[in-house]
Amino acid sequence: MLRKVSNIVSGLPKIHLAAATICTGIIGASLLLPSNEVEATRSTIKLITPKSETTVTSAAAKADQNAKPAESSTENNPVALTTDAQQTASFDSTGMLEATEEQESLASPAPIIENWIEYEVRSGDSLSTLFKRAGLSARDVYQVSQATQEAGVLKRLYPGQTLSFLIEGGEMEKLRFSQDQLNSVQLERTEDGYKVEHISLTPDVEQRIVSGKITNSLFLDAERAGLSGRMIMQMAQILGWDIDFALDIRKNDSFRVLYEEKFLDGKKIGEGDVLAVEFKNRGRTVRALRFVDSNGDTNYYTPEGESMRKAFLRSPVDFRRISSSFNPERYHPVLGKKRPHRGTDYAAATGTPIKAAGDGKIIWRGTKGGYGKTIILQHGGNITTLYAHMNGYKSGLSAGSRVKQGQVIGYVGKTGMVTGPHLHYEFRVNGVHKNPVTVALPHAQPVPSKERAAFTKQSSQLLALLEGETTIALADNDR
């Protein structure tokens, strides 16, 4: 039967065969078209392609990438994929592809991705070693050095800092130097060389109060209360003229410190300054308040406006212990007989720096009998201080030299008539020896009269916070 039909068809004229084919196509198409009774529908098909391995690293590369899809236009290939993300294609009832909102958003230009390479500065690193590590040449080092010479950045690098490079085609396009968490410098290549931009972030500042009681030592108890080593040292320096933290501290002494903490994006990045501190020592209360004057100078004062800084340091050396106190009736360990000890001996390792107790002028520098190597300073018209048994003098100083309080003038030794390394320190008023540990030290200058109103405003706010009235906030300009 099939063979007969085949023979009949093959026997028909070619024109008849063509007409039959056209009719068959029309009938098939009519069967596929929806009737008037059928509602139009839309189907959504998710098309997924493998992730692209190409990363856009420059505007030029981005332009090239945008130009390539022209070869496979959606006119010729309606389901062609142009991104490496998951996309959604929609077909209407006629089977034609329609763009969805998701596709339209994906069709927008992709952001430029920059591939930065970061290097952390290690001990012994220099600009040359870091550039070499990044695959750059000595010429690059020279160009960057010239560009930053005036700004003074990149002259000194410290461990922990970072350098980030953006290198394209073997050329350094950008360099970012992070000095710290808040400050960085960025260099960008231009036709005329490198453009230098300084970037500074402003942290959020909050106040915090920490209080505690002495049961063992200042450092241990303050650290247990929540103070960092930096805050403990700052507190000791502020109060150091009034309290000798090596000798005066007693059990049940107490402290209260108001200070600043710095935050960036909600994360603590460091601490600011002590704003106010109170220390109760052996029945007396010492308070210090931070004040910034109209010139921007910062100092600490009592609530009454007297300077916390005295005209003299209580101890001119960082010592281990007092090996011999001021004692007019002392028995001399070398001579073996009674001989007045008119100063204080601070035991310390050989080479420990000795600091000038106050501003003054050197009126003696040289060997002085049993004192050994000695320096004597004249302070004003009626006070002199003596520093004996030195191992050596600070270079550049001689008789007649002017020195500042805290300036190093020499180093602990054991020259002269001594049994071990220490500093023998004397304090004389009108030629009369005074006990350096207990003598009343004159204050530095108080708050100037023209700054009194501003000081009163700041100090009242700080005292309120220090005393626990934490609802009172400091205005930015009062900090």
Image (cartoon, rainbow, N blue to C red):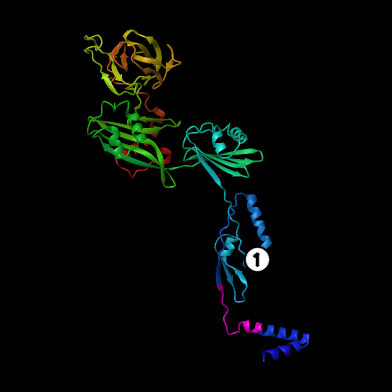
Residue 298 location, x and y as percent?
Answer: 41, 31
Give residue 241's quadrant in the image.
top left
Identify which residue, 237 or 50, lies in the foreground. Answer: 50
Q: Is residue 475 left or right of residue 11?
A: left
Work out which residue is located at the far top of the displayed protein and give it.
369
The image shows residue 22, relative to residue 295, as above or below, that is: below
Give residue 100's quadrant in the image.
bottom right
Residue 29: say if magenta.
yes
Identify which residue, 412 or 466, lies in the foreground. Answer: 412
Identify which residue, 77 or 324, lies in the foreground. Answer: 77
Residue 395 location, x and y as percent?
Answer: 44, 16
Residue 459 location, x and y as percent?
Answer: 35, 35
Task: Give the residue drawn at x 73%, y 89%.
Answer: 7
Residue marked by disc 1: 74
Q: Amino acid at mark 1?
A: Thr
Q: How packed is label 1: few (under 14 Cα within 10 Å), some, or many (20 or more)? A: some
Observer able to see residue 477 = yes
Q: Which residues are magenta?
A: 28-43
Residue 133 location, x and y as percent?
Answer: 55, 38
Task: Give the residue drawn at x 35%, y 16%.
Answer: 413
